[in-house]
Image (tube, rainbow, N blue to C red):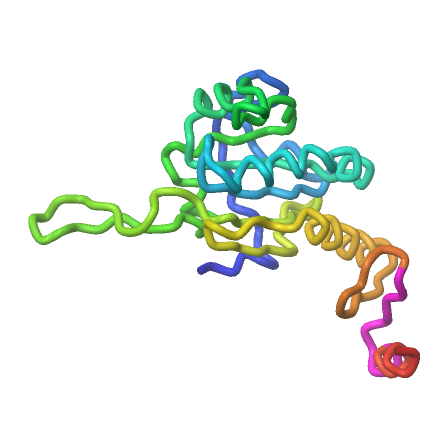
Amino acid sequence: MAVLVGKKAPSFKATAVENGEFVENFSLEQYIGKKHVLFYFYPMDFTFVCPTEIIAFQDRMEEFERKGVAVVGCSTDTHFSHFAWLNTPRNQGGIEGVNYPLVADASKTIAQNYDVLAGHYDYNEEGEVTFIGEPVAYRGLFLIDKEGVVRHQVVNDLPLGRSIDEALRMVDALQYFEEKGEVCPANWSEGKEAMQATKEGVSSYLAKH
């Protein structure tokens, strides 16, 4: 699994569905210099854990927007599948009402470049191309700063849903560091004390806690 933290987020252009409309040549580069980006992958449309995450992000969208964060989802489905799911009522297993972008990665190249594809292509004994593993994305999440650099990543296996609270906490930590220059210790959350990245700063913090 590649560690992308500290590196430029892999670029791409793909079709997305946003606010019920197809957006061709969608790219994260539109946010550079303007917003932080929380870019996450989910395995598949019309499944079980995935809608709980997608809707949970939507339910907290006001908080992300208030912090100047763009939320973007992505799976290896087509944009037509995204569109159909977005137009399916929630009481029928759909995600109706979600308006942030969902990127279509049917070629699986975006998931491959972010190293979250849950398998790989290989050749069998007959020389035929085959896929080993699952041809879907793990639950990868990448927090990208305004310069387009990945500052945080976490990757969950397919059955394990993510914490929206933790995603927001990491946004707060990154933005606090960018604004104040202080680092955020274990279990830090907005409103708590941070510390200077010096021996004196660490000693002072530990003495209080």
Query: Image check: 43 left or right of 201?
Result: left
Tell me if residue 25 can be seen.
Answer: no
Up-down: is 26 above or below 205? above
Residue depicted at x 80% and y 55%:
178
Residue 104 lies within the magenta run: no
Q: Residue at x 85, y 55 (%)?
A: 190
Question: Which span is picked out in magenta?
Answer: 192-201
Residue occupying image coordinates x 50% and y 23%:
85
Q: Position of residue 164 (x, y in %)?
A: 68, 47
Q: Position of residue 13 (x, y in %)?
A: 49, 31
Q: Position of residue 73 (x, y in %)?
A: 57, 36
Question: Which residue in the rendered view is the most extreme toward the left?
Answer: 126
Across the whole image, how many numbered discs are drawn on residues?
0
Residue 106: tell me if it is visible.
yes
Q: Position of residue 193 (x, y in %)?
A: 89, 66
Q: Nearer the viewer, residue 148 or 69?
A: 69
Which residue is found at the position 42% from the left and 36% from the top? Answer: 76
Quadrant holding the N terminus: bottom left
